[in-house]
Each structure stands twice: as C-alpha cells, then as structure tokens.
Amino acid sequence: MFIPSKIEQLIIDNKLTKKSFCEKVSISVQGLDNILKGADLGSSKLERIADFFKLPIDYFFDRDINVDNSIGHHVNGNGNKVSGDITLSECKNELEKLRLLIKEKEERIKDKDEMIALLKQQLNK
C-alpha cells in the first residue's frame, strides 16, 4: 500500500518547502496536497519523487521485500533492479585476498630496500 506520509516526512527532513519541492519534481502544489491526502499517484510522478530523494520506488510502499545479497557491475533503472555476477560475499573475499597480497608485496619491498641499503654499505667500505 502506498504511504503518502513518507513524502511529507522527506520534505520536512530535507528542510524543503512544498513549493520548492514541487518545482524540483515538476508537480503542482495542489497536486502534491492531493497526493498527501491519498489521491492516486501516477508512476511517472512517483519516479520523479523517488529520483529526487535518491530512493527506490518501493520506499514509498508498505511492502516486505527480500533484498538479494549480490552486487553487480551495473544497475538498471533507479536501483530497483540490480544485475551482475558477483555476490557480496565473493566480493568481500576477493577484497581480503587483495589486501593480503598488498601486505605481502609491501613486506617484500621493505626487505629489498634493507638489502639494497646493506649492499650500498658494503660498497662504501
């Protein structure tokens, strides 16, 4: 079910006037007042409102949705559908492997720098 009070709360939380908000999302103040009173809201208006607040359209509905624990290479639409082939856990594992690899490389560089310093000392004797 659509929850119009969420729009009103976002306007308040973002310290906007109804007039300035309406100008930014291209709707009339009267139209906004009707929406807040429960009038039907077209999908294009709702999409503009969701985009303005950088929220998925589902935010404005009382729904339980299961969020897939995967991330992808790209996002389609307004973040309502994510597609790709890398799960979040795989991404975290890969990140950890890369961190360990960087640490190992830094240690090898440090060892080589120490070795170079010792060789330079021997040359200067």
Image: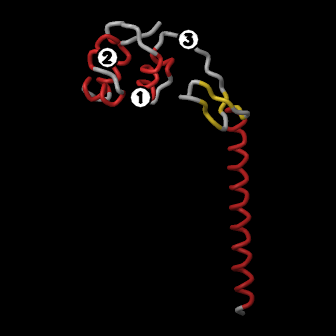
Using residue 85 as the reference point, say whether residue 14 is left or right of it.
left
Q: Amino acid at mark 2?
A: Leu
Q: Which disc is residue 64 wearing?
A: 3
The answer to whether residue 76 is above or below residue 2 is: below
* Residue 53: % across, % down: 41, 28
Q: Which residue is at 73% across, 57% downward?
A: 104
Task: Return the residue nearer the eye: 103 or 117.
Answer: 103
Query: Which residue has dot 1 on it?
Result: 53
Crowding around mark 2 (Cα neighbors within 10 Å: few <14, some 14 to 19, many 20+) is many
Task: Return the residue nearer the eye: 43 or 86.
Answer: 43
Q: Which disc is residue 32 wearing?
A: 2
Q: Residue furthest bottom?
A: 125
* Residue 94: % across, % down: 72, 42
In front: label 3 or label 2: 2
Among the 4 quarters of the image, the one containing residue 32: top left
Q: CA distance from mark 3 to mark 1?
A: 20 Å
N-terminal of the pair, mark 3 or mark 1, is 1
Q: Amino acid at mark 1?
A: Phe
Using residue 81 as the reference point, say whether residue 21 is left or right of it.
left
* Quadrant of the drawing holding the C terminus: bottom right
The answer to whether residue 97 is above or below residue 71 is: below
Crowding around mark 1 (Cα neighbors within 10 Å: few <14, some 14 to 19, many 20+) is few
Find out whether the residues at labels 3 and 1 contact each other: C-beta distance under 8 Å: no
Using residue 87 as the reference point, say whether residue 58 is left or right of it.
left
Q: Amino acid at mark 3?
A: Asp
In front: label 2 or label 1: 2
